[in-house]
Image (cartoon, helix red, strand yellow):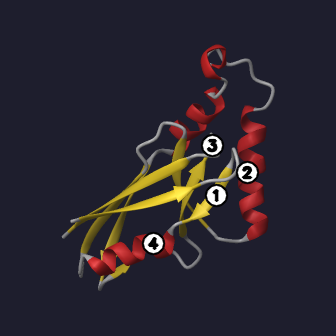
Amino acid sequence: MRGKIIITTKERYELTDITSEVEEIVKNNNLENGIITVFVPHSTAAILLTENEEGLKKDWIDFFKNLVAGKNFLHDRIDNNADSHLLSGLLGQGKVLPVKNKKIVRGTWQNIFLAEFDGPRERSVEVVVIS
């Protein structure tokens, strides 16, 4: 059982809340209890759990940019996106989340985000449902 989400990002660094789309996939697959994997098959994007609050989203983007600012990465000689690969690797391209009583188990303020580090691009997110 699975589902796929397609997102078109507009900025080089961007956070897109995909919580409702992931919840819809859980609902459509009739998962009562189990786990889901949320995976982005791209080496310059990641999956992040955080609060959907505008100030915090900007804080995250600023944090990411500051983390890699002013560095002389060797990979940039090829295609100038070493920062994107490194940030993706640090955050990780996937998360595993429990499902209990047809609901994704997450904290009150935890939403599921696609973190874009090399946009704008079209991204896919694979959701696998396991009962």
> Depth check: 76 or 60 in front?
76
Q: Quadrant of the C terminus?
A: bottom left
- Estimate the x, y position of residue 96 in percent, counting from the top left: 36, 59
| Residue in the image at 39% along x and 77% along y | 24
Q: Tell me the tag on residue 129.
A: none
Where in the figure is residue 35, as x and y percent of width and height?
28, 67
Q: Which amino acid type is shown beneath numbered disc 3?
A: Phe
Residue extending furthest toward the bottom: 101
Chain-order first, disc 2 or disc 3 = 2
Q: Amino acid at mark 1?
A: Leu
| Label 3 CA crowd tier, 10 Å (few <14, some 14–19, many 20+) | many
Please report contact status of discs 2 and 1: CB closer than 8 Å, yes or no. Answer: yes
Which is nearer the N-term, disc 2 or disc 4?
Answer: 4
- CA–CA distance between discs 2 and 3? 9 Å
Q: Quadrant of residue 76?
A: top right
Report x, y in % for residue 8.
Answer: 57, 55
Residue topped by disc 2: 61
As measured in the structure, the alpha-carbon distance from the residue carrying label 3 to the one carrying label 4 is: 21 Å
Q: Nearer the viewer, mark 2 or mark 3?
A: 3
The residue that disc 4 covers is 21
Name the secondary structure under disc 2.
helix
Give the residue at x 77% y 58%. 58
Residue at 71% over, 71% down: 53
At label 4, the amino acid type is: Glu
Rendering coords of residue 12 (x, y %): 69, 44
Query: Regarding mark 4 in the picture, which secondary structure is present there?
Result: helix
Residue under label 3? 117
Mark 3 or mark 4, which has the lower sequence index? 4
Q: Label 2, label 4: how many angstroms apart (C-alpha)?
A: 22 Å
Residue 81 vs residue 94, the one in the foreground? 81
